[in-house]
Image (spheres, grey):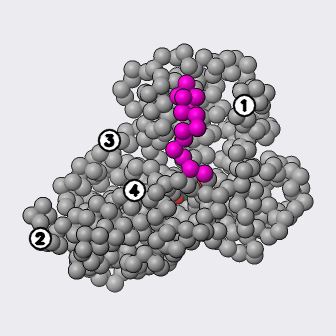
Amino acid sequence: MARLVVVGGGIAGLAAAWSARCAAARAGVALDVLVLERGSEVGGKARTIVRDGWMVEGGPSGFLGGRPELDSLLRASGLENDAVLASARAKRRFLFRAGRLREIKTSPLGFARSGIMSFGGLLRLGVEPFIPRSRRTDDETVWAFAARRLGTEAADRLVSPMTLGIFAGDSRKLSLASAFPKMARLEREHGSLIRGLIARRGRTSAGPLTSLRGGMQSLPRQLAENGGFRVRCGATVRRIDRADIGWTVSIEGDGATLEADAVVIAAEPWVAASLFRPLDASAADALGAIPCPPVTVVALGFNSTARARIPDGFGVLIARGEGIRMLGNLWETSLYPGRGPAGGILVRAMFGGAVDESIGALDEAEMLTLARREVAQLYGLTAAPVFEHVVRLARAIPQYEVGHALRVAAVERAVETMPGLAVTGFGLRGVAFGDAAADGVRTGENLGRWLATCQIGSTACL
Ligand SMILES: Cc1cc2nc3c(=O)[nH]c(=O)nc-3n(C[C@H](O)[C@H](O)[C@H](O)COP(=O)(O)OP(=O)(O)OC[C@H]3O[C@@H](n4cnc5c(N)ncnc54)[C@H](O)[C@@H]3O)c2cc1C
């Protein structure tokens, strides 16, 4: 039986383990798959905490549905009936600017009246369809692209907070092509974002915002349970080496060394960098150059008296320069059922990211003090929270900065020279939960097929 070891039990690693086993089985070959996970349980960034009637997500709280890879993972884990769609209220999104919560209306008139943009800024936004397509061939930043097409005011007031909301990232550093490839494509194909959006109206490929009844961690947990592979938690992989045939994987602590025909590295980029160091220095350098700043999530639960002050909707992004350190809030109990006790309101506040790396230095008590003060200030609340939970992530979300595509290409080139080694995870080809899951499925499928071919004696594997 061929042996595959997967390093990392986040969604990407588990998806790779499951799809490799399935692809090999389809080719008539049984595959022994072992996932090694450093933590005490699987899930990685997907971490669901249930306490005192509240359900808190330490990482992702939802994903965009309609992806076949995610659907197949839900079926494999037995959770196909556990998906919950976000309420229709999730369409209501807010921005805190110039001291007020302002709804980001989608109608042109509603948006113009929201007070988010000045009259001059709106006029500049309106001429976007007439701005010629760029002839730039370099890797443009998100901010430079937004300023060029939509004007500097829209880049500062809309696109920068949005970039913080999605990547906890700095729009002046992130690469448009790597972080927002769909925006780059709209300009390339339609010559304008506005014209492109109009032309593609009703043809969006993104599915509805979705979560899971038992929280996001229920997918990795159930996949580990039902996926047909083995998982060992509390096992930190220290080193991967080429053997005469296949690979050896060394685990920290007990000094155990496992032999494998193939290995998937599904750990975060900085871990992958250290595992690649003895194998290929250029891939290690490329992975090591992907920054992952800290993020702290503070969940505050309020009783129903806060309902009058906190809007019903998705949440709020907070523009910089407002004297508030929070990047934004998600209103979890507005989005999905079962996130709090009856009448309770759960606010998840995000801090840190690429624009505030010093957040990592604040301990749990300091974070609670800061979050209580800023949430009270934002909504004008006087009532104290009745529930609190803090999740501190020293390195949270990989930043796809300018040059990211070259770094990914360097890693892919190195992997091509090492048969039986693959890399996946949200550090490379998509930062969202669905991207990581889909990349894991594809990576596992390729490796499972390759291993099956080797088992039946193909020379392609030599
Ligand atoms: C605060 C936050 C909020 C987010 N919100 C959203 C959201 O709302 N929607 C969305 O789509 N995405 C969101 N994301 C992104 C989403 O969480 C990720 O895309 C996804 O969870 C990444 O999965 P992964 O398997 O690639 O990596 P991870 O989940 O990081 O898994 C990597 C695993 O490798 C393990 N590991 C590391 N080193 C070793 C080692 N040496 N040996 C063994 N195991 C090791 C780690 O312990 C970890 O379990 C969010 C992320 C964060 C941090």
When the figure is inspected, residue 56 is found, relative to residue 359, above or below; the finding is: below
Determine whether, in the image, residue 185 is placed left or right of residue 367.
Answer: left
Q: Nearer the viewer, residue 92 or 168?
A: 92
Q: Which residues are magenta?
A: 195-208
Q: Is residue 200 magenta?
A: yes
Q: Residues within 10 Å of mark 4 (few under 14, many from 20)?
A: many
Quadrant location of the N terminus?
Answer: bottom left
Q: Amino acid at mark 2?
A: Gly
Q: Secondary structure at mark 3?
A: helix
Q: Amino acid at mark 3?
A: Leu
State which mark lies toward you, 4 or 3.
4
**Predominant SS along the magenta part:** loop
Circle 4 residue: 439
Q: Residues within 10 Å of mark 3 (few under 14, many from 20)?
A: few
Q: Earlier in the sequence, mark 3 or mark 1?
A: 1
Please give the label number shown on residue 107.
1
